[in-house]
Image (tube, grey):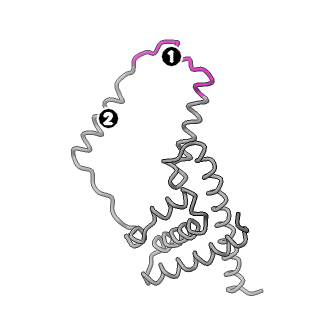
């Protein structure tokens, strides 16, 4: 395991390099484009700083290509076709039908079933939050999540230090 300060220094170096590259590509950026560039460069720097064995870092690098950044953030959403509207109406009609009355045995769920459903729901949410988490099993998911959380903490700490340093430059005491 590497020293945390060296990881943070490497992250900062890669993040600043990414910010410079993105700022050179487009001179007049809107607020949202700038925000997207900062997030993308931070994600890529964080992923490339971590061990290559982590799946979340590989997923971040694979999902964030330069084409994603260059694409305009103000793209309009496509209009739904009439066939999709009719499918949505059909689905709505199906849902509005009255359901059959369930027997008392089916309604009574044991605590084990409730706990299992709750665990599955939380696992699904965690898989959606973690980059590349959809393809992970539960054991790997926990280890990858812990590593991802540590990386996010490092990223936040570096960003806080950068903000503090920039404030000292702008407003010297």
Which disc, if any, is residue 91? 2
Is residue 69 left or right of 13 when viewed as pictured? Answer: left
Q: Determine the residue positioned at 58% across, 30% down.
A: 116
Residue 40 percent across, percent down from the top left? 50, 69
Q: CA distance from mark 1 to mark 2?
A: 25 Å
Q: Quadrant of residue 88?
A: top left
Q: Residues within 10 Å of mark 2 (few under 14, many from 20)?
A: few
Which disc, if any, is residue 132? none
Q: Which residues are magenta?
A: 100-114
Q: Quadrant of residue 100?
A: top left
Earlier sequence position, callout 1 versus callout 2 = 2
Are the two marked residues, 1 and 2, in contact with CB atoms closer than 8 angstroms?
no
The secondary structure type at the circle numbered 1 is: helix
User: Where is mark 1, residue-wise?
Assistant: 106
In the depicted structure, whether residue 169 falls above or below residue 159: below
Q: Residue furthest top?
A: 104
């Amino acid at each position: 395991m590497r020293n945390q300060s060296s990881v943070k220094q490497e992250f900062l170096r890669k993040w600043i390099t990414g910010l410079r590259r993105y700022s050179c590509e487009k001179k007049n950026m809107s607020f949202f484009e700038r925000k997207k560039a900062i997030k993308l460069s931070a994600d890529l720097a964080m992923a490339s700083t971590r061990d290559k064995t982590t799946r979340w870092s590989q997923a971040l690098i694979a999902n964030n290509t330069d084409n994603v950044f260059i694409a305009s953030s103000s793209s309009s959403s496509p209009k739904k076709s009439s066939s999709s509207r009719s499918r949505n109406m059909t689905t709505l009609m199906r849902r509005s039908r009255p359901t059959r009355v369930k027997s008392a045995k089916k309604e009574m769920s044991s605590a084990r079933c409730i706990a299992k459903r709750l665990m599955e729901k939380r696992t699904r949410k965690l898989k959606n939050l973690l980059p590349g988490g959809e393809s992970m099993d539960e054991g790997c998911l926990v280890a990858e999540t812990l590593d991802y959380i540590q990386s996010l903490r490092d990223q936040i700490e570096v960003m806080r230090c950068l903000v503090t340093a920039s404030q000292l430059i702008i407003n010297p005491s």
